[in-house]
Image (spheres, rainbow, N blue to C red):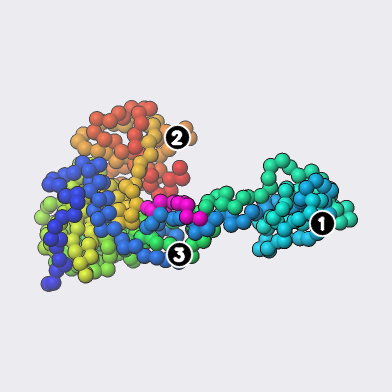
Amino acid sequence: MSHLSSLATAADPRPVAGPSSWDQARQLAHAAGQAAAMPVTRLPLARCAGLTLAAPLAAQGNLPAFRTCCMDGWAVRGPGPWRVVGQVLAGASPAALTVDGTAVQVATGAPVPTGATAILRAEDGVLVDDRVHGAPRTRPEWREIGEETRVGELLLPAGVEVTPAVLGLAAASGHDDLPVRPAPSAAVLVFGDELLAAGPPAGGRIRDALGPSVPAWLRWLGARPDQPPQPLPDTFDGHVAALEGALTRADLVCATGGTMRGPADQLRPALLELGAELVVDCVAVRPGHPMLLARLLGPAGMVRFVAGLPGNPQAAVAALVTLVAPLLAGLRGRPLPAARRAALGAPVPGRLGGTALLPVRYDEDGLVRPLPHTGPAMLRGLAEADGYAVLRPGAGTDIGDTVPVLPLPGDGR
């Protein structure tokens, strides 16, 4: 069997031996992604939504480019009443007003004629024959040239998401395309002889919950997952073949199950066979401590990653937010995902060992409360959660103590 190539040297920061702390694991995953960041490409604006700006965005022209009328009404010169001598609509090039006591009717968005001293709003003026009467307001009713931005001015730094608002700003300031980092491609492999692909659990077998959900998690985290997978058997040769195939088409492979070191766990032996280098080998976190992140070379020498997600569903999600979210942020040229801080609205039972990730929900007072049904194999509590409270060793867990909270899909805060 022809295998993928291993890495000759480790990218910074160097992997660590043994379990990493939760914070260290996130840093390692993010740095590994940064070192292998997606190549920059230039795309038309219509194809940039959701991608990452790969270079600072600067204005290509003044915004607005001309003195722009903010209201329907009349552009007037000097004291009134004013004789109306014309009309200016948006997109026109008006002649200058050169005589006091004259005016032109103007529309919102139209250029203000040179020589105009004020705008008389439509609701403040009365037209009698060819003359308009009224009193302009003291505040100017137009936008000056370059009021929003000047040509060459920095609008946004690299590394921000290209949102609809960013697209609008880019277009308004003169851009037709943008340099972006594309979304990494991803594949999901679900291993487990005990898994059913359809129907309710029965006969000692359980329904696969990760095959349908992990691709959706990856999409939320900014990757482009392929089709939802079917469960695969727990064999060494099956692991090697499935990993080899997935790594030829995906920047990131998320493999679920088999992350322990027992006789039935094949992921680590298969990665060793493929020459992979472990960036993170277990994390001092509950749930999901046997999670891992590996790196190897795929076709044409491109760096590929394998994230090993534990088979228990919530432990797998913990691995996604711990390792995969930082990795994808690095690959996309974005900073390490930040946590919010919130106060606990209820005490949290004591925890042993490393960091704990606890599904919580915000109450009406903005406090976070732990949810029931949050064991490593459970998804019920997670389905109601707004985020994961990050409970580090020694941190306070009483009512009112402040904890970091990582947002989850559906969090509207």
Q: Position of residue 169 (x, y in %)?
A: 51, 55
Whether pointer 3 and pointer 2 mark residues with C-beta atoms closer than 8 Å, the reply is: no
* Residue found 21% across the figure and 34% down from its top: 352
Residue 366: image tag: 2
Q: Earlier in the sequence, mark 3 or mark 2?
A: 3
Q: Is residue 50 left or right of residue 230?
A: right
State which region is magenta.
Answer: 151-161
> In this rendering, which labeled residue sits more in front, label 3 or label 1?
1
Distance Cα–Cα, label 3 vs label 1: 43 Å
Instruction: Assess disc 3: are there few (<14), some (14-19) or many (≥20) residues with their C-alpha within 10 Å of its C-alpha.
Output: some
Q: Nearer the viewer, residue 141 or 366?
A: 141
For marks 1 and 2 on the same chain, the one whose residue lies earlier in the sequence:
1
- Write the residue at 29% across / 50% down: 326
**In front: mark 3 or mark 2?**
3
In the rendered image, residue 158 lying in the magenta stretch gets the answer yes
Mark number displayed over residue 177? 3
Pointer 1 residue? 84
